[in-house]
Image (spheres, rainbow, N blue to C red):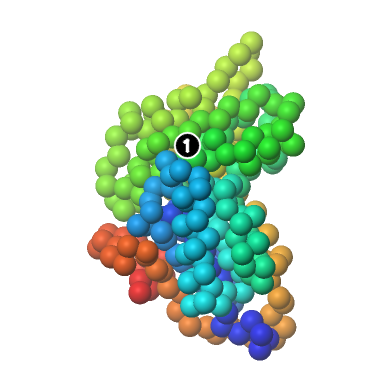
């Protein structure tokens, strides 16, 4: 690794544990990099936050994150945050490349056969101007249904920690994604919250018919990789441990265990 990038970590940021779905892809593509996972669990869930307050919170928080970790790049592994604060973060910290996670509406529009696409997200993401603009720019020929769920991010957190989640409750949350008209029906559901891929197998089992559940994590990791300065040495990966930081300062036992399972030391 060259001098300049030596041990500068990649930040992966989310409101909770959803960003781990992006981290796991990022690690596959960038095994020689050190990762710092930051969960703003003190602010979780982001879905219902008022936009101005959430924007200030995240931009202010990054002043400390950048001062402390001097990241090579920062991945905002959260649709609810990215669709709101990416521009402000780039303006406030122009030296840091930010990679966002925004609803995969463009690839869904390119891939759908029926023209019926649903976007499953938090209430915050579905009401963003950014999301509407994506539809206007890339999916005017499709019927795009925005489905905002108040409960799924918390359900995904509980599920991944090993708690029981009622099938009926999940079926209710995903039901509005399924639309049928004149013999055509939804064939793609965009997972537009990084928490949801943790529930993808449950969604598959409970769906009224098979659809493509589109998870953009790998594409985000590829984008991040494309922004990295090349590691010229070809040497074996050699870096400090990956760590997880929780803004509450006090993640519970099951969260710590989960982080350990992901190879992250909770500090
Ligand atoms: N994981 C976040 C996202 O991608 C949101 C979870 C939440 O805070 O509600 O939108």
Q: Position of residue 227 (x, y in %)?
A: 70, 67
Query: Residue 66, image x and y in percent?
Result: 54, 73
Q: How many marks?
A: 1
Residue that appears at 50% across and 56% down? 56
Q: Is residue 207 above or below residue 94?
A: above
Taking 125 as reference, is 17 above or below it?
below
In the image shown, does 8 or 186 lie closer to the viewer? 8
Work out which residue is located at the far left of the displayed protein and give it.
253
Residue located 53% across and 56% down the image: 77
What is the secondary structure assignment of the residue under circle 1? Answer: helix
* Quarter of the rendering occupied by the C terminus: bottom left
Percent position (x, y) of residue 134? 68, 39
Report the front residue among 79 and 172: 79
In this view of the protein, which residue sits in the foreground, 111 or 50? 50
Q: Which residue is mark 1?
A: 123
Does residue 20 appear in the picture of this structure? yes
Mark 1 burial class by Cα count in 10 Å: few <14, some 14-19, many 20+: some
Rendered position, 13 above or below 79? below
* Location of residue 88 by image quarter: bottom right
Farthest residue toward the top? 182
| Ligand 1 closer than 8 Å to label 1 CB | no
Image quarter where the N terminus lies is bottom right
Residue 201 relative to residue 87: left or right: left
Provide residue 144's location: percent of width, then percent of height. 63, 28
Residue drawn at 66 percent across, 85 percent down: 4
In the drawing, does residue 137 fall left or right of residue 125?
right
Locate residue 184 relative to residue 140 in the image: left or right: left
Q: Is residue 193 visible?
A: no
Q: Residue at x 57, y 48 (%)?
A: 84
């Amino acid at each position: 690794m060259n001098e300049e990038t030596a041990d500068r970590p990649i930040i992966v940021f989310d409101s909770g544990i959803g960003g781990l779905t992006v981290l796991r892809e990022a690690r596959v593509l960038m095994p020689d990099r050190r990762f710092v996972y930051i969960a703003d669990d003190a602010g979780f869930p982001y879905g219902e936050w008022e936009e101005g307050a959430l924007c200030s919170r995240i931009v202010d928080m990054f002043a400390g994150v950048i001062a402390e970790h001097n990241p090579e790049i920062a991945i905002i592994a959260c649709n609810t945050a990215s669709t709101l604060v990416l521009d402000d973060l780039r303006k406030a910290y122009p030296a840091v490349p930010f990679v966002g996670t925004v609803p995969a509406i463009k690839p869904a529009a390119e891939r759908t056969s029926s023209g019926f696409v649903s976007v499953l997200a938090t209430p915050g993401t579905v009401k963003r101007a950014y999301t509407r603009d994506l539809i206007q720019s890339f999916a005017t020929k499709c019927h795009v249904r925005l489905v905002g769920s108040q409960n799924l991010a918390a359900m995904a957190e509980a599920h991944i920690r090993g708690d029981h989640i009622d099938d009926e409750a999940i079926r209710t949350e995903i039901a509005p994604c399924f639309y049928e008209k004149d013999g055509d029906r939804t064939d793609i559901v965009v997972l537009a919250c990084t928490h949801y891929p943790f529930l993808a197998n449950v969604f598959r089992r409970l769906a009224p018919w098979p659809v493509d559940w589109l998870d953009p994590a790998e594409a985000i990791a590829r984008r991040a990789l494309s922004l990295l300065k090349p590691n010229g040495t070809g040497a074996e990966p050699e870096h400090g441990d990956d760590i997880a930081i929780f803004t509450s300062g006090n993640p519970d036992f099951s969260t710590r265990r989960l982080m350990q399972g992901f190879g992250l030391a909770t500090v």
